[in-house]
Amino acid sequence: MFGAADTWPAARPQIANWLGSHAGQVAEVLDQPLRLVGRELQERRDELIEWALSPSGLIAAITDLAGQDGHPDLAQRLAEAGVLPMFGFPTRERLLTGCRGWGPGLVAEAAQDVVGAAGELAGTDRAARLASIRAAISA
């Protein structure tokens, strides 16, 4: 979503402008996770929205983290610092399951890079050794 941390200076004005002109959508996005948290955070909704929209809030926090040493992906840095949730990105890893029949012990799982996973599903040699490959869906 954000790309490399060192590209933030170029993206910053666009993100700041978008936030400034889409306050209603920012509130809608914030309302989704607020439904799942305790009353203390729900009562701070307006304060959180103001922080997200303020140049000295979210934009400043991202700018600060982008300028520090750390993971090259900005989304990873933001998640590690607790600024924004990760939602599974920027991983390129996919969990695959292989099944040889039915029953306990007959299912194997392997985490693999998305390129390798695509190859598995496209019929590479390794895929041919497995009777069935299905992408695991985790909720």
Image: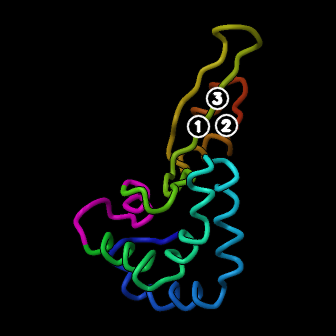
Q: Residue furthest right?
A: 102
Separation of marks 2 and 1 at Cα, in angstroms: 9 Å
Q: Amino acid at mark 1?
A: Leu
Who comes first in sequence, dot 3 or dot 2? 3
Q: Is there a contact, CB below 8 Å, between mark 3 and mark 2? A: no
Return the x and y of residue 36 as percentages of the image width and height: 67, 47
Instruction: Check disc 1 and report its element: helix, strand or loop.
Output: strand
How crowded pointer 2 is (Cα within 10 Å; few <14, some 14-19, many 20+) is rated as: few
Q: Is residue 62 above or below residue 54?
A: above
The image quadrant of residue 130 is top right
Q: Which residues are magenta?
A: 68-80
Q: Residue at x 64, y 65 (%)?
A: 30
Q: Which residue is mark 3?
A: 97
How crowded pointer 1 is (Cα within 10 Å; few <14, some 14-19, many 20+) is rated as: some
The image quadrant of residue 60 is bottom left
Instruction: Check disc 2 and report its element: helix, strand or loop.
Output: loop
Q: Is residue 109 above or below residue 86?
A: above
Instruction: Check disc 3 and report its element: helix, strand or loop.
Output: strand
Q: Is there a contact, CB below 8 Å, between mark 2 and mark 1? A: yes
Q: Residue at x 41, y 58 (%)?
A: 76
Who comes first in sequence, dot 2 or dot 1? 1
In front here: 110 or 43? Answer: 43
In front here: 16 or 1? Answer: 16
Q: Is there a contact, CB below 8 Å, between mark 3 and mark 1? A: yes
Q: Amino acid at mark 3?
A: Thr
The image quadrant of residue 132 is top right
Kindly identify which numbered label has been placed on residue 95: 1
Q: Amino acid at mark 2?
A: Ser
Q: Nearer the viewer, mark 2 or mark 1?
A: 2
Return the x and y of residue 14 as percentages of the image width and height: 52, 90
